[in-house]
Amino acid sequence: MMNKLFLASAIVLLYSFSTAATAQDGTDLYNSAKDAYADADYSKAIDLAKESASQGSSEAMILLGDIYLAGNGIPQPDPQEALNWYMAADAQDNNVAQYKIGNMYYDGHGVNQSFPDAAAWFEKAANGGNVDAQSELGLMYFRGRGIPRNYELAFKWFSMAAEQNDARAMCYLGGMYNNNNMGVKTNTLKAAEYWRKSAELGYPEAEFYLGQMYMVGRGGIARNADSAMIWINKAAIDGNAGAQYYLGESALRRNDMENAKAWFEKAAGQGHAKAQQQLDNINGVSGQN
């Protein structure tokens, strides 16, 4: 009896060591595959990632999905094969894979575009703690993109993403607190707090809003034109069209036509209608001279 118990214990112990070794091997293979991918050695990356995936590495499955989606090292992108690998990783409840599947449905990349399906996959990933999915799902509810607009759910998911320092979610929370018709009670102090956090993480839209807070003295922030322009200039340089238009208007009021035109061109290039109108006016005036 004692011999049988000893034998059973030895088998369990041996299996545990074997499983741990296999998992470690799979991790090492994945790391090697990732290094090969970073070095643009895609053929090697695919081989190593497939071997790692065969040992159960969901990270390797995601890497293969990324490779096939981008078409790196293969004749052309293969979204269906990418989806197969993401689905394999989802079978291990990998929330990164779930988020990527959601993106495929959102963009209609390799599958029929379906915002409800995208939202369902984002929610699955978000419930697993994926911050990108939480932020994306919040945005879908905020905009009512393919699903009914719901500010309460938008606020819920933005709040969860903000807890993980997602700059976009913080920016939108600031906007919701700054308005009185978005499902939360107006609180300019909270708005300024979220915009500052988002701006300090480099989110251009929040940089612009924080600059405006400084310009008018709002949300518990003392009016300070110098600080306002620091943030607005940063937002414009970081690509925010509203800030670029603002600087164009400021230059126009100073009769600085060169800078006005430069900023209006940047904003108009991003589809800012008022900037395009001002640019047309400037070019019309220039054409008459």
Image (spheres, rainbow, N blue to C red):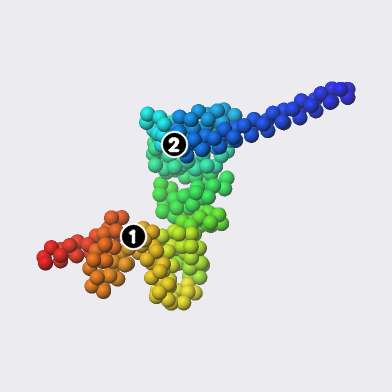
Determine the residue located farthest toward the left in the rendered image: 288
| Amino acid type at mark 2 | Ala
Sequence-wise first label, 2 or 1: 2
Q: Quadrant of residue 227?
A: bottom left
SS state under label 2: loop
How far from the left and from the top, in percent, is residue 180?
Answer: 45, 67
- How many circles with numbers are drawn on the protein? 2
Q: Is residue 201 visible?
A: yes
SS state under label 1: helix
Residue position for label 2 = 40
Q: Quadrant of the N terminus?
A: top right
Q: Residue at x 37, y 66 (%)?
A: 233
Give the crowd class for mark 1: few <14, some 14-19, many >=20 residues within 10 Å. Answer: many
How far from the left and from the top, in percent, is residue 184?
Answer: 50, 63
Front one among 195 and 112: 195
How far from the left and from the top, in percent, is residue 88?
Answer: 53, 32
92 over 203 or under it: above or below: above
Which numbered disc covers residue 241?
1
Q: Residue at x 44, y 55 (%)?
A: 142
Q: Is 122 left or right of 287, judged from the image as shown?
A: right
How far from the left and from the top, in percent, is residue 179?
Answer: 44, 66
